[in-house]
Image (tube, rainbow, N blue to C red):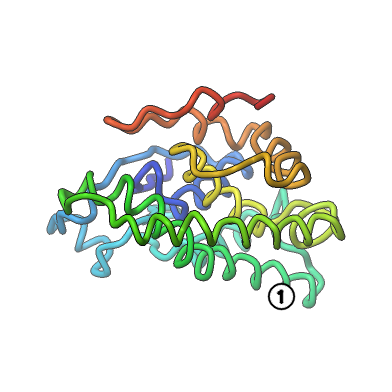
Amino acid sequence: MARLFHVPLSPFCRKVRLSLAEKKIEVELVEERYWEADPDFLRRNPAAKVPVLRLDGVMMSESAAICEYIEETRPEPSLMPSDPLAKLEVRRLVGWFDDKFHNEVTSKLLYERVNKKMMGQGFPDSRNVKDGAKAIKYHLDYMTWLLDHRRWLAGDVMTLADFAAAAHLSALDYISDVDWNRSEVVKDWYAKIKSRPAFRSILADQVSGFPPPRHYNDLDF
């Protein structure tokens, strides 16, 4: 069985979990307090980051590389198009959420509200929280524009781009930091993703000291 060293609210871990679940790869989840720099974990990944996946006898790190490996070795159901330009757009949007969205929103909201407390790093920086709350509006509006022109974020079929976005938004939704009333089209898109069997373990997550809101695991939120 595959083994994933993860943190439940990490969007990078969630993206890998969604890819594994969509392809029906059974995985053992091992929660890893990576900030404690445990020597055993550092041997698995000297970068001291999650996710780390053990699959096919190989220890893998970096979520984008992991997801591409899963896609290449387990191509069905496909999460990447075959057309080079369509593939480029998927990778662009994965990068958008894992880089721009992460830096402007996730790190300002989730990391300030949750990670700092878990790591014993003090109280949230109110300026960062304010900046993140402002930035997420821009990103939701950009997603609205994409979904007004496409069925899914990168085109006519669901891809890894949708999982990357849903990984970030689901983690933020756990702490009630997504205004679903801002965009009906984004809310409908998330409802479709949320109802997939691959999302079940994500919706079952419980983080000690941080109970999710009532709507978090409600498919008809």
**Residue 8 position (above or below residue 75):** above
Instruction: Name the side, left or right, on which 201 lies relative to 52.
Output: right
Q: Amino acid at mark 1?
A: Leu
| Number of other residues with Cα within 10 Å of mark 1, as a class: few under 14, some 14 to 19, many 20 or more | some
Q: Position of residue 162 (x, y in %)?
A: 67, 53
Q: Residue 149 lies in what quarter of the image?
A: bottom right
Image location (x, y in percent) of residue 15: 53, 52
On the image, the x and y values in percent for residue 217 come to: 55, 26
Assign a secondary structure to mark 1.
Answer: helix
Q: Residue at x 46, y 58 (%)?
A: 132
Residue 28 relative to residue 121: left or right: right
* Outermost residue, left side: 39
Which residue is at the front of the view, 179 or 213?
179
Task: Name the foreground residue: 184 vs 62.
Answer: 184
The residue lying toward the viewer, choosing from 10 and 180, is 180
Relative to residue 166, is residue 152 drawn left or right? right
* In the rendered image, the vertical position of residue 218 relative to residue 124, given as above or below: above
For the C terminus, the quadrant is top right
- For image coordinates 81% across by 53% down, the residue present is 157
Residue 48 falls in image quadrant = bottom left
Can you identify the residue that label 1 sits on?
A: 88
Q: Residue at x 57, y 40 (%)?
A: 21
Task: Name the residue rendered at 64%, 40% in the picture.
Answer: 180
How many marks do you count on the picture? 1
Instruction: Report the quarter where the N terminus lies.
Output: top left
Left or right: 4 as drawn, with respect to 220: left
Measuring from the top left, give residue 172's x and y in whole percent: 48, 45
